[in-house]
Image (cartoon, rainbow, N blue to C red):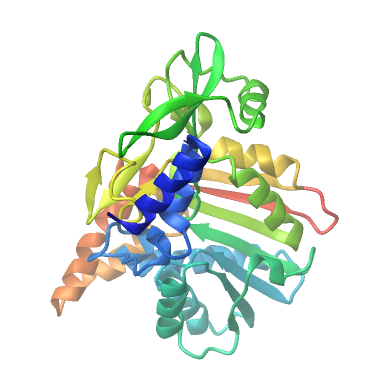
Amino acid sequence: MRPLEEKLKTRIREAGPIPFRDFMHAALYDPEHGYYMRRVEIGARGDYLTSAHLHPIFGELLAEKFLALLRDLAPPWTLWEWGAGMGRLAADLLAALERRSDAPSIRYLICEISPHLHQQQRRLLGDRSHVAWVGEGDLAAESLTGIIFSNELLDAFPVHRVLRERGQWRELYVTLRGETFAWTLGELTRPEIARYFEEIGLELAEGHIADVAFDIVPWLRRVAAILRAGYVVTIDYGDTADRLYGRAHPMGTLRCFYRRRLVADPLSRVGEQDITASVDFTLLEYAGRTAGLDVLEFKSQREFLMELGLLERASMWLRSAPSSPEELAAQLALKHFLVPGDLGQAFKVLIQRKRADGSG
Protein backbone atom coordinates (compact mmCIF):
# COMPACT_ATOMS: atom_id res chain seq x y z
CA MET A 1 0.00 0.00 0.00
CA ARG A 2 1.19 3.53 -0.77
CA PRO A 3 2.38 5.31 2.43
CA LEU A 4 0.15 8.36 1.93
CA GLU A 5 -2.92 6.19 1.39
CA GLU A 6 -2.27 4.42 4.69
CA LYS A 7 -1.69 7.76 6.43
CA LEU A 8 -5.05 9.12 5.22
CA LYS A 9 -6.90 5.88 5.99
CA THR A 10 -5.56 5.95 9.55
CA ARG A 11 -6.75 9.53 9.92
CA ILE A 12 -10.24 8.63 8.68
CA ARG A 13 -10.46 5.57 10.95
CA GLU A 14 -9.50 7.66 13.96
CA ALA A 15 -11.40 10.90 13.27
CA GLY A 16 -14.05 10.07 10.68
CA PRO A 17 -14.60 11.37 7.15
CA ILE A 18 -12.46 14.29 5.98
CA PRO A 19 -13.43 17.09 3.57
CA PHE A 20 -12.16 16.43 0.05
CA ARG A 21 -10.29 19.72 0.39
CA ASP A 22 -8.09 18.14 3.09
CA PHE A 23 -7.67 14.94 1.07
CA MET A 24 -6.53 16.90 -2.00
CA HIS A 25 -4.17 19.06 0.07
CA ALA A 26 -2.50 15.94 1.47
CA ALA A 27 -2.34 14.26 -1.94
CA LEU A 28 -0.53 17.25 -3.42
CA TYR A 29 1.40 18.77 -0.51
CA ASP A 30 2.06 16.16 2.18
CA PRO A 31 5.69 16.95 3.15
CA GLU A 32 6.89 13.38 2.59
CA HIS A 33 4.60 11.88 -0.01
CA GLY A 34 2.64 14.69 -1.70
CA TYR A 35 2.67 14.86 -5.49
CA TYR A 36 4.37 18.27 -5.65
CA MET A 37 6.80 17.49 -2.84
CA ARG A 38 8.33 14.54 -4.69
CA ARG A 39 10.23 14.43 -7.99
CA VAL A 40 7.44 15.95 -10.07
CA GLU A 41 8.25 16.45 -13.75
CA ILE A 42 6.72 19.30 -15.74
CA GLY A 43 6.99 19.50 -19.52
CA ALA A 44 7.08 16.99 -22.37
CA ARG A 45 8.12 14.11 -20.08
CA GLY A 46 5.93 15.09 -17.15
CA ASP A 47 2.26 14.77 -16.27
CA TYR A 48 1.37 18.13 -17.79
CA LEU A 49 2.68 21.04 -19.88
CA THR A 50 2.63 24.74 -19.05
CA SER A 51 2.69 27.63 -21.51
CA ALA A 52 6.26 28.43 -20.49
CA HIS A 53 7.39 24.94 -21.52
CA LEU A 54 5.85 25.25 -24.97
CA HIS A 55 7.85 28.21 -26.26
CA PRO A 56 10.07 31.06 -24.95
CA ILE A 57 7.80 33.57 -26.72
CA PHE A 58 5.50 33.37 -23.70
CA GLY A 59 8.17 34.68 -21.33
CA GLU A 60 9.37 37.25 -23.87
CA LEU A 61 5.94 38.82 -24.27
CA LEU A 62 5.28 38.69 -20.54
CA ALA A 63 8.53 40.60 -19.97
CA GLU A 64 7.28 43.34 -22.30
CA LYS A 65 4.03 43.65 -20.36
CA PHE A 66 5.76 43.64 -16.99
CA LEU A 67 8.13 46.44 -18.05
CA ALA A 68 5.16 48.54 -19.18
CA LEU A 69 3.40 48.00 -15.84
CA LEU A 70 6.51 48.69 -13.76
CA ARG A 71 7.17 52.02 -15.45
CA ASP A 72 4.02 53.38 -13.80
CA LEU A 73 5.55 52.67 -10.37
CA ALA A 74 8.33 54.31 -8.39
CA PRO A 75 11.48 52.11 -8.24
CA PRO A 76 13.08 49.98 -6.88
CA TRP A 77 11.04 47.23 -8.50
CA THR A 78 10.49 43.58 -7.62
CA LEU A 79 9.04 40.65 -9.55
CA TRP A 80 7.81 37.91 -7.21
CA GLU A 81 6.84 34.62 -8.83
CA TRP A 82 4.75 32.15 -6.86
CA GLY A 83 5.19 28.50 -7.78
CA ALA A 84 7.89 28.73 -10.45
CA GLY A 85 7.71 25.09 -11.52
CA MET A 86 10.96 23.96 -13.15
CA GLY A 87 12.02 27.62 -13.50
CA ARG A 88 11.38 27.81 -17.25
CA LEU A 89 9.24 30.96 -17.16
CA ALA A 90 11.67 32.68 -14.80
CA ALA A 91 14.57 31.84 -17.12
CA ASP A 92 12.75 33.19 -20.19
CA LEU A 93 11.60 36.33 -18.39
CA LEU A 94 15.05 37.08 -17.03
CA ALA A 95 16.71 36.42 -20.38
CA ALA A 96 14.29 38.78 -22.12
CA LEU A 97 14.90 41.51 -19.53
CA GLU A 98 18.67 41.04 -19.68
CA ARG A 99 18.61 41.52 -23.47
CA ARG A 100 16.93 44.89 -23.07
CA SER A 101 19.38 47.77 -22.77
CA ASP A 102 16.61 49.97 -21.36
CA ALA A 103 15.54 47.46 -18.71
CA PRO A 104 16.37 48.66 -15.19
CA SER A 105 17.70 46.47 -12.41
CA ILE A 106 14.85 44.35 -11.11
CA ARG A 107 14.91 42.07 -8.08
CA TYR A 108 13.40 38.65 -8.88
CA LEU A 109 11.96 36.63 -6.00
CA ILE A 110 10.54 33.11 -6.07
CA CYS A 111 8.25 31.43 -3.55
CA GLU A 112 8.45 27.64 -3.92
CA ILE A 113 7.35 25.02 -1.39
CA SER A 114 8.55 21.95 -3.33
CA PRO A 115 12.15 21.03 -2.43
CA HIS A 116 12.61 19.18 -5.73
CA LEU A 117 11.34 22.07 -7.86
CA HIS A 118 13.43 24.49 -5.79
CA GLN A 119 16.55 22.53 -6.77
CA GLN A 120 15.51 22.47 -10.43
CA GLN A 121 14.99 26.23 -10.40
CA ARG A 122 18.40 26.92 -8.86
CA ARG A 123 20.06 24.65 -11.41
CA LEU A 124 18.39 26.41 -14.34
CA LEU A 125 18.69 30.01 -13.15
CA GLY A 126 22.30 29.82 -11.97
CA ASP A 127 23.97 32.35 -9.68
CA ARG A 128 22.21 35.56 -10.67
CA SER A 129 22.75 38.01 -7.80
CA HIS A 130 19.31 39.62 -8.20
CA VAL A 131 17.39 36.31 -7.91
CA ALA A 132 16.41 35.00 -4.47
CA TRP A 133 14.06 32.42 -2.96
CA VAL A 134 11.82 33.64 -0.15
CA GLY A 135 8.92 32.32 1.88
CA GLU A 136 5.65 34.14 2.33
CA GLY A 137 6.58 35.04 5.89
CA ASP A 138 9.95 36.52 4.91
CA LEU A 139 8.49 39.81 3.66
CA ALA A 140 6.91 42.51 5.80
CA ALA A 141 3.63 44.26 5.03
CA GLU A 142 3.86 46.91 2.30
CA SER A 143 7.51 46.04 1.67
CA LEU A 144 7.30 45.34 -2.05
CA THR A 145 6.72 47.59 -5.06
CA GLY A 146 6.29 45.70 -8.30
CA ILE A 147 4.46 42.64 -9.57
CA ILE A 148 3.41 39.47 -7.77
CA PHE A 149 2.51 36.85 -10.35
CA SER A 150 1.74 33.19 -10.89
CA ASN A 151 1.36 30.92 -13.90
CA GLU A 152 -0.68 27.77 -13.30
CA LEU A 153 -0.46 27.97 -9.53
CA LEU A 154 -4.01 28.48 -8.33
CA ASP A 155 -5.44 25.52 -10.25
CA ALA A 156 -3.47 23.36 -7.80
CA PHE A 157 -5.07 24.93 -4.71
CA PRO A 158 -7.22 22.31 -2.94
CA VAL A 159 -10.94 22.66 -3.56
CA HIS A 160 -14.08 22.30 -1.50
CA ARG A 161 -16.52 20.18 -3.52
CA VAL A 162 -19.92 21.65 -2.66
CA LEU A 163 -23.47 21.11 -3.90
CA ARG A 164 -27.10 21.87 -3.09
CA GLU A 165 -29.24 18.99 -1.82
CA ARG A 166 -32.94 19.68 -1.18
CA GLY A 167 -32.15 23.37 -0.90
CA GLN A 168 -29.32 22.91 1.62
CA TRP A 169 -25.60 23.39 1.11
CA ARG A 170 -23.61 20.17 1.43
CA GLU A 171 -19.95 19.28 0.98
CA LEU A 172 -18.28 16.14 -0.35
CA TYR A 173 -16.11 14.30 2.17
CA VAL A 174 -13.88 11.25 1.80
CA THR A 175 -14.64 8.20 3.92
CA LEU A 176 -13.77 4.48 3.86
CA ARG A 177 -15.86 1.57 2.64
CA GLY A 178 -13.85 -1.37 3.81
CA GLU A 179 -10.35 -0.43 2.70
CA THR A 180 -11.43 1.73 -0.24
CA PHE A 181 -11.76 5.52 -0.31
CA ALA A 182 -15.34 6.59 -1.04
CA TRP A 183 -17.47 9.74 -1.19
CA THR A 184 -19.94 10.86 1.46
CA LEU A 185 -21.82 14.09 2.18
CA GLY A 186 -21.41 16.38 5.18
CA GLU A 187 -21.84 19.93 6.40
CA LEU A 188 -20.08 22.88 4.80
CA THR A 189 -16.69 23.32 6.43
CA ARG A 190 -16.58 26.96 5.30
CA PRO A 191 -19.94 28.78 5.51
CA GLU A 192 -18.23 31.66 3.67
CA ILE A 193 -18.69 29.67 0.46
CA ALA A 194 -22.48 29.93 0.75
CA ARG A 195 -22.14 33.67 1.44
CA TYR A 196 -19.91 34.04 -1.62
CA PHE A 197 -22.53 32.49 -3.92
CA GLU A 198 -25.19 34.69 -2.36
CA GLU A 199 -23.13 37.87 -2.75
CA ILE A 200 -22.32 37.26 -6.42
CA GLY A 201 -25.96 36.37 -7.08
CA LEU A 202 -25.30 32.87 -8.38
CA GLU A 203 -27.60 29.96 -7.60
CA LEU A 204 -26.15 26.48 -7.94
CA ALA A 205 -28.53 24.01 -9.58
CA GLU A 206 -29.75 21.13 -7.40
CA GLY A 207 -27.19 18.31 -7.37
CA HIS A 208 -24.58 20.18 -9.40
CA ILE A 209 -21.06 20.13 -7.94
CA ALA A 210 -18.99 23.30 -7.62
CA ASP A 211 -15.25 22.92 -7.04
CA VAL A 212 -14.33 26.04 -5.06
CA ALA A 213 -10.71 26.74 -4.09
CA PHE A 214 -11.64 29.08 -1.25
CA ASP A 215 -8.07 29.03 0.08
CA ILE A 216 -7.47 31.58 -2.68
CA VAL A 217 -9.25 34.24 -0.60
CA PRO A 218 -6.90 34.36 2.42
CA TRP A 219 -3.90 33.78 0.13
CA LEU A 220 -4.70 36.79 -2.05
CA ARG A 221 -5.31 38.99 0.98
CA ARG A 222 -1.94 38.03 2.48
CA VAL A 223 -0.13 38.61 -0.80
CA ALA A 224 -1.83 41.97 -1.37
CA ALA A 225 -0.84 43.09 2.12
CA ILE A 226 2.85 42.63 1.24
CA LEU A 227 2.42 44.83 -1.83
CA ARG A 228 2.99 48.53 -1.18
CA ALA A 229 2.04 49.42 -4.73
CA GLY A 230 1.87 47.40 -7.91
CA TYR A 231 0.06 44.49 -9.46
CA VAL A 232 -1.05 40.92 -8.90
CA VAL A 233 -1.01 39.00 -12.20
CA THR A 234 -2.73 35.60 -12.37
CA ILE A 235 -2.43 33.36 -15.43
CA ASP A 236 -4.34 30.11 -15.19
CA TYR A 237 -6.86 27.68 -16.61
CA GLY A 238 -10.32 28.84 -15.60
CA ASP A 239 -13.20 31.23 -16.11
CA THR A 240 -15.82 33.33 -14.36
CA ALA A 241 -18.08 31.79 -11.72
CA ASP A 242 -21.20 31.82 -13.90
CA ARG A 243 -19.42 29.68 -16.50
CA LEU A 244 -17.66 27.31 -14.10
CA TYR A 245 -20.66 26.58 -11.90
CA GLY A 246 -23.30 26.60 -14.63
CA ARG A 247 -24.96 23.73 -16.47
CA ALA A 248 -21.87 23.07 -18.59
CA HIS A 249 -20.08 21.50 -15.59
CA PRO A 250 -22.67 19.56 -13.54
CA MET A 251 -19.95 17.33 -12.04
CA GLY A 252 -17.53 20.18 -11.34
CA THR A 253 -14.21 20.94 -13.01
CA LEU A 254 -11.91 18.60 -11.06
CA ARG A 255 -9.37 16.79 -13.25
CA CYS A 256 -6.51 14.38 -12.57
CA PHE A 257 -3.45 13.67 -14.69
CA TYR A 258 -1.12 10.72 -14.55
CA ARG A 259 1.70 10.48 -17.10
CA ARG A 260 -0.04 12.96 -19.41
CA ARG A 261 -3.30 10.97 -19.32
CA LEU A 262 -6.59 12.23 -17.94
CA VAL A 263 -7.68 10.11 -14.96
CA ALA A 264 -11.29 9.93 -13.78
CA ASP A 265 -10.84 9.05 -10.10
CA PRO A 266 -9.31 11.69 -7.77
CA LEU A 267 -9.30 9.16 -4.91
CA SER A 268 -6.85 6.82 -6.66
CA ARG A 269 -3.03 6.91 -6.98
CA VAL A 270 -2.85 9.20 -3.96
CA GLY A 271 0.28 11.33 -4.15
CA GLU A 272 1.21 10.00 -7.58
CA GLN A 273 -1.16 11.94 -9.84
CA ASP A 274 -1.79 15.64 -10.32
CA ILE A 275 -5.18 16.95 -9.18
CA THR A 276 -6.41 20.26 -10.53
CA ALA A 277 -9.57 22.33 -10.92
CA SER A 278 -10.45 25.35 -13.04
CA VAL A 279 -9.74 28.67 -11.34
CA ASP A 280 -12.71 30.85 -10.41
CA PHE A 281 -11.60 34.32 -11.50
CA THR A 282 -14.75 35.86 -10.02
CA LEU A 283 -13.49 34.61 -6.64
CA LEU A 284 -10.16 36.39 -7.21
CA GLU A 285 -11.97 39.64 -8.00
CA TYR A 286 -14.22 39.12 -4.94
CA ALA A 287 -11.24 38.56 -2.63
CA GLY A 288 -9.34 41.44 -4.20
CA ARG A 289 -12.03 43.99 -3.41
CA THR A 290 -11.42 43.59 0.32
CA ALA A 291 -7.64 43.55 -0.17
CA GLY A 292 -7.27 46.91 -1.87
CA LEU A 293 -7.07 45.47 -5.39
CA ASP A 294 -9.06 46.60 -8.39
CA VAL A 295 -9.27 44.86 -11.76
CA LEU A 296 -7.10 46.39 -14.46
CA GLU A 297 -7.45 43.66 -17.11
CA PHE A 298 -9.23 40.34 -17.51
CA LYS A 299 -9.06 38.50 -20.83
CA SER A 300 -8.10 35.24 -22.50
CA GLN A 301 -4.40 34.44 -22.70
CA ARG A 302 -4.65 34.49 -26.50
CA GLU A 303 -6.12 38.01 -26.53
CA PHE A 304 -3.55 39.13 -23.95
CA LEU A 305 -0.62 37.83 -26.02
CA MET A 306 -2.08 39.12 -29.29
CA GLU A 307 -2.17 42.64 -27.85
CA LEU A 308 1.52 42.28 -26.96
CA GLY A 309 2.47 41.42 -30.55
CA LEU A 310 2.18 37.63 -30.61
CA LEU A 311 1.55 37.46 -34.36
CA GLU A 312 4.50 39.67 -35.24
CA ARG A 313 6.84 37.86 -32.85
CA ALA A 314 5.62 34.44 -34.01
CA SER A 315 6.17 35.35 -37.67
CA MET A 316 9.82 36.09 -36.86
CA TRP A 317 10.18 32.61 -35.35
CA LEU A 318 8.41 30.96 -38.29
CA ARG A 319 10.24 32.85 -41.04
CA SER A 320 13.40 30.77 -40.86
CA ALA A 321 13.58 27.04 -41.55
CA PRO A 322 14.20 24.99 -38.40
CA SER A 323 17.78 23.77 -38.12
CA SER A 324 17.12 21.10 -35.50
CA PRO A 325 14.30 18.89 -34.17
CA GLU A 326 14.14 21.21 -31.14
CA GLU A 327 13.56 24.27 -33.33
CA LEU A 328 10.89 22.41 -35.31
CA ALA A 329 9.13 21.42 -32.08
CA ALA A 330 9.28 25.03 -30.88
CA GLN A 331 7.71 26.27 -34.11
CA LEU A 332 4.94 23.68 -33.93
CA ALA A 333 4.29 24.65 -30.31
CA LEU A 334 3.39 28.20 -31.34
CA LYS A 335 0.01 26.96 -32.59
CA HIS A 336 -1.08 26.39 -29.00
CA PHE A 337 -0.99 30.15 -28.47
CA LEU A 338 -2.43 31.10 -31.86
CA VAL A 339 -5.31 28.69 -32.45
CA PRO A 340 -8.67 29.78 -30.96
CA GLY A 341 -9.97 27.19 -28.52
CA ASP A 342 -6.52 25.86 -27.63
CA LEU A 343 -4.46 26.89 -24.59
CA GLY A 344 -4.76 30.55 -25.56
CA GLN A 345 -8.52 30.55 -25.04
CA ALA A 346 -8.77 28.12 -22.13
CA PHE A 347 -6.31 30.16 -20.07
CA LYS A 348 -7.18 33.57 -18.69
CA VAL A 349 -5.10 36.51 -17.50
CA LEU A 350 -6.22 38.69 -14.59
CA ILE A 351 -4.29 41.83 -13.63
CA GLN A 352 -5.25 43.45 -10.33
CA ARG A 353 -3.77 46.75 -9.17
CA LYS A 354 -2.95 48.21 -5.77
CA ARG A 355 -2.15 51.90 -5.52
CA ALA A 356 0.43 53.36 -3.14
CA ASP A 357 -2.32 54.81 -0.94
CA GLY A 358 -3.75 51.31 -0.48
CA SER A 359 -6.74 51.87 -2.73
CA GLY A 360 -7.44 49.80 -5.81
Residue 308's spot in the image, x, y percent?
47, 58
Res. 356 image quadrant? bottom right
Residue 327's spot in the image, x, y percent?
20, 74
Q: Residue at x 37, y 26 (%)?
A: 249
Q: Residue at x 69, y 52 (%)?
A: 353
Res. 144 image quadrant? bottom right
Q: From the viewer's perspective, is residue 309 above or below residue 124? A: above
Extreme residue in the top direction = 166
The residue nearer to you, when weighing 13 against 162, is 13
Residue 295's spot in the image, x, y percent?
65, 44
Q: Seen in the image, is 282 located left or right of residue 253?
A: right
Q: From the viewer's perspective, is residue 278 above or below residue 103? A: above
Extreme residue in the front direction = 14
Res. 13 image quadrant? top left
Number of labels in the image equals 0
Image quarter in which the N terminus is found: bottom left
Q: Is residue 90 visible?
A: yes
The residue nearer to you, when weighing 35 against 125, is 35
Q: Residue at x 65, y 50 (%)?
A: 220
Extreme residue in the right direction = 357
Q: Seen in the image, is 268 located left or right of residue 212?
A: left
Residue 73's spot in the image, x, y percent?
73, 66
Q: Residue at x 48, y 34 (%)?
A: 17
The residue nearer to you, when weighing 157 against 345, is 157
Q: Seen in the image, is 137 located left or right of residue 281?
A: right
Q: Is residue 155 visible?
A: no
